[in-house]
Image: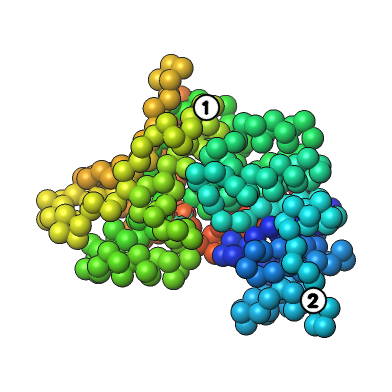
Amino acid sequence: MKYKIGLIGCGTVGQGLLEILETKGEALKKDFGFDAKVVAITDKIKGTATAPGGLDIKKVLALLSQGKSLADYRPGKKAAEADPLDVIAACDADIIAELTYTNIQTGEPATSYIKKALQAGKHVVTSNKGPAALHYHELKELAKKKKVQLRIEGTVMSGTPVFTLFESGFAGNEVKEIKGILNGTTNFILTKMELENMDYADALALAQKLGYAEADPTADVGGFDALAKVVILSNVILGGDVKPSDIKPIGITGITKQMVMEAKQEGFRYKLIAQTKRDGGKITAGVAPQKLPLSDPLAGVMGAQNALTFDMDLLGKVTIQGPGAGKLATGDAILQDLLAIHRNLR
Ligand code: HSE
């Protein structure tokens, strides 16, 4: 089946997706019958390029790597600055990949983009944690009403499967508790402080350079990014109606290198732990650093890796570990959602 995709936002995740489509496009067509063209890309900083017949992805990636604007896609024919809402309405994409920066407080402008796309009858895939944490049930309802799909695999643990597990291998299980490491940046910082004796600020700068950190890294180190993810898990997997404002996260800003080293000598390791639990009708969720014994499986999760332990009624405890951030890892989450839309439509 053929698909036309529109990209709203073309930062780390968008470029990861473009690289994947460029390198794997032929294999995806051959192996899964998934034939995708990118018909529009719009980004607040990088500009806009559209082509109803499909953009030349190699050319787009070359422009971006040279730091040029997407407006240079057609030399001499500079497109006017475009409002993403207009691009969503005007382009003939059947799937919108909403990949703009997360705003955990307001969920905007991403929520408006997603609503616009769903209302126009387009499927939506997003890695944006704002709309998923703040408005998941409302957006899902809108998608259902419009008979299109809304998928959010990239919001938690990047391309490491979480939500799709509950459509396949974990289907039918009731989850009692979810506990894990959901922020790659803070786990990376704690790892670098312990194993390489690196200073907090240097480790954070490196996490930013590697594309793990949020545009505003206070969301990472203050625990707000992990909070958004645990709210998403609470609402999507535990069926709750938790709001980010219900939880006060504690981040890693109070954890010093000295504390990390002292814990190490005692056989412990600090981890930023996100937890959510259903107790009857009540869901209790939180984010805080915990000093774990080295025997705890979560204590062995290092670098930008994430991990989650699901405690389920049929299967018992299952722990998954994998990348939680990064260009290709999150681009892969978007690919997984595109392929899921394709599977569901066939
Ligand atoms: N800033 C996030 C992290 C990116 O470090 O985990 C992925 O959501």
Q: Quadrant of residue 151?
A: top right
Q: Nearer the viewer, residue 172 or 306?
A: 306
Residue with the mark numbered 2:
78
Q: Relative to 212, is 22 on the left or the right?
A: right
Q: 75 above or below 239?
A: below
Residue 292 visible somewhere in the drawing: yes
Q: 34 above or below 290?
A: below
Q: Relative to 13, is 80 on the left or the right?
A: right
Q: Which mark is residue 104?
A: none
Residue 68 place in picture, x, y as percent: 66, 79
The local secondary structure at tag 2 comes to loop
Q: Which amino acid, by three-letter code, is at mark 1?
A: Asp
Q: Which amino acid, by three-letter code, is at mark 2?
A: Lys
Residue with the mark numbered 1:
241
Q: Nearer the viewer, residue 51 or 295?
A: 51
The earlier-in-sequence mark between 1 and 2 is 2
Residue drawn at point x = 60 percent, y = 47 percent: 108
Residue drawn at point x = 40 percent, y = 65 percent: 207
CB within 8 Å, label 1 to label 2: no
Q: Relative to 59, is 295 on the left or the right?
A: left
Q: Nearer the viewer, residue 308 or 76?
A: 76
